């Protein structure tokens, strides 16, 4: 059994670093598509999100998540240790986000960068969106998954009313005196306000769901858009 698991781990490791194609499992009607999964390394774990398993007869696709842990020694190198978790992926709340550099509004010279995601303890993906041009400061942190359990906004009253078609986050830094695509005004684009992010092809829509403050001095949140911008991915 151990040899079998080591062999499987070897296949998985190879899929991370080489280009592969879908492969039908012998004796089944199922095709595994590691090349289509979101693969993220954290520490000595390899986390695979939404590995498509396709029934080649019916075309039905089921997505699986799995996490594989490795150990290391000078004599043997990396050795598979255990499967940390495996299960059916929950439905996506929004389109997958594409890390990379994005241009601001038409005519803008400001460039934003959406980071490669890191994986949180509950398998959520964590991104940062920030201005990299140096002309002003804007940073937001974005976390995938169910908004009602979101680590930054899950406790807010508005959480249950927000649409599941976005990936949500909060603004964590903003230059109040200047700006560009996300230029702060009296009531908009301020720290701790909620944003929703959605990918459509090469466009990244950023929608603001907060405006002003409530009676306690906290951001006033809404289930409808208060402002928004569309960033365009830069193909390098």
Image (cartoon, rainbow, N blue to C red):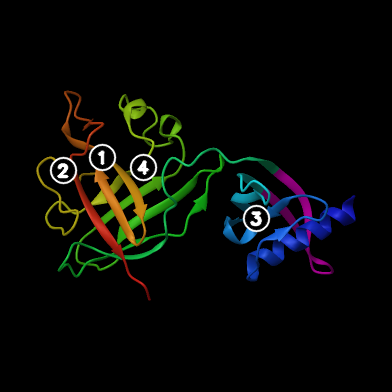
Q: Are marks 2 and 1 in contact (CB under 8 Å)?
A: yes
Residue 136 is situated, as x and y percent measured from the top left of the image, at 20, 61
For the point 25% across and 68% down, which residue is it?
133
The residue at which mark 3 appears reads as: 46
Q: Are marks 2 and 4 in contact (CB under 8 Å)?
A: no
Q: Is residue 149 left or right of residue 188?
A: right
The Cα–Cα distance between marks 4 and 1, rounded to whole angstroms, is 15 Å
Q: Disc number at residue 156?
A: none
The residue at which mark 2 appears reads as: 188
- Dot 4 falls on a residue whose secondary structure is loop
Q: Decide which of tag 1 and tag 3 comes sooner along the chain.
A: 3
Q: Disc number at residue 166?
A: 4
Is disc 4 surrounded by few (<14), some (14 to 19) or many (20+) residues within 10 Å? many
- Dot 2 falls on a residue whose secondary structure is loop
The Cα–Cα distance between marks 4 and 3, rounded to whole angstroms, is 26 Å
Q: Decide which of tag 4 and tag 3 comes sooner along the chain.
A: 3
For the point 16% across and 59% down, which residue is it?
180
């Amino acid at each position: 059994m151990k040899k079998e698991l080591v062999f499987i781990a070897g296949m998985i490791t190879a899929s991370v670093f080489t280009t592969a194609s879908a492969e039908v499992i012998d004796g089944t009607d199922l095709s595994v598509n590691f090349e289509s999964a979101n693969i993220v390394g954290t520490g000595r774990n390899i986390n695979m999100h939404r590995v498509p398993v396709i029934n080649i007869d019916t075309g039905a696709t089921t997505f699986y998540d799995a996490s594989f842990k490795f150990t290391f020694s000078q004599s043997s190198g990396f050795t598979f240790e255990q499967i940390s978790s495996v299960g059916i992926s929950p439905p996506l709340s929004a389109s997958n986000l594409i890390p990379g550099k994005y241009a601001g509004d038409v005519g803008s010279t400001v460039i934003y960068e959406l980071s490669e995601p890191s994986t949180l303890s509950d398998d959520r993906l964590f991104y940062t969106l920030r201005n990299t041009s140096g002309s002003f400061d804007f940073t937001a942190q974005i976390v995938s998954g169910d908004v009602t359990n979101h680590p930054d906004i899950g406790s807010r009253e508005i959480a249950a009313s927000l649409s599941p078609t976005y990936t949500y986050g909060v603004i964590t830094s903003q230059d109040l005196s200047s700006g560009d695509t996300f230029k702060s005004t009296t009531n908009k684009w301020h720290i701790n306000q909620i944003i929703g992010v959605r990918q459509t092809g090469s466009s990244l829509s950023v929608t603001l769901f907060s405006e002003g403050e409530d009676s306690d001095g906290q951001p006033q949140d809404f289930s409808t858009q208060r402002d928004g911008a569309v960033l365009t991915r830069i193909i390098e």
